Amino acid sequence: MRMRKKKHLNERMERVASFLIGNPSEMSGKWAQISGGRPLHLEIGCGKGKFICETAASNPDIFFIALEKVPDVLVMAMEKAGMEGLENVRFLRGDAGLLRAYFSPREVERIYLNFSDPWPSNRHRDRRLTSEGFLRIYADILSDGGSIFFKTDNSALFEFSVKEFNRCGWILRNVTRDLHGGWEGGFNPAGGAVTEYERRFHSMGIPINRLEAYKR
């Protein structure tokens, strides 16, 4: 369902403009200038920002970058970061296909893919964020031994992704098709911060798939 356009979007964006990297292509190779030399972690498709803000708050020694295409949800993520007073997170409005322009080779240590669009039609398989073309982009910007942490409720996308990671030579660890199943505490902490989608799907009894993929 298409999100309704937010009222006063421009004014809201201006109030949290300090969190937005306006010209990300100018930052390639220069992220250390604002990160203070901390490791860079990138979330692709941050939505309303629950995951990235909670993760940034829990890890002050890491600098987080959140990529989002839709300004109406991007502004909510930036507002959340502002309300929580986070200094170790910045946001980009951009496309995952342009990551090589935003980051230099081996500049990012970890990438998070949380509940990405499954693009179920086979003719759209190349648009899936775990397809070979994107994996090649990630491999270029990730450090040696860098990782991708991937979560999805879509079992078909997960099985496709497992095959694609293996075919492209990534090392898979901690692969599970039911991350929170049987966990007495409600949510398995091994999965990290819980996203809005994750909480909703879990309440509906839909298993959460998760894996970690490491660059050789």
Image: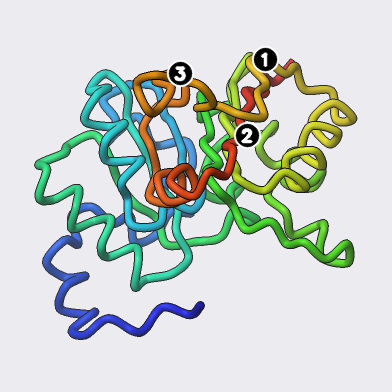
The reply to whether discs 1 and 2 touch (Cβ–Cβ < 8 Å) is no
Which percent across, then down, holds residue 158? 73, 40
Question: Mark 3 highlights which residue?
Answer: 190
Whether 7 is drawn above or below 130: the answer is below
Label 2 element class: strand
Q: Residue at x 18, y 58 (%)?
A: 79
Whether 190 is drawn above or below 124: the answer is above
Badge 2 crowding class, 10 Å Cα cut-off, few under 14, some 14 to 19, many 20 or more, is many
Q: Nearer the viewer, mark 1 or mark 2?
A: 2
Mark carried by residue 209: 2
Look at label 3 and name its amino acid: Ala
Q: Residue at x 34, y 73 (%)?
A: 72
Label 1 element class: strand
Which percent across, then down, holds residue 104? 56, 36
Whether 104 is drawn above or below 129: the answer is above
Of the numbered discs 1 and 2, the one sitting upstream in the chain is 1
The reply to whether discs 1 and 3 touch (Cβ–Cβ < 8 Å) is no
Look at label 2 and name its amino acid: Asn
Residue 61's image quarter? top left
Q: Residue at x 40, y 45 (%)?
A: 199
Mark carried by residue 173: 1
Viewer-proximal residue, 107 or 85?
85
Cα gap from disc 1 to disc 2, whole angstroms: 13 Å
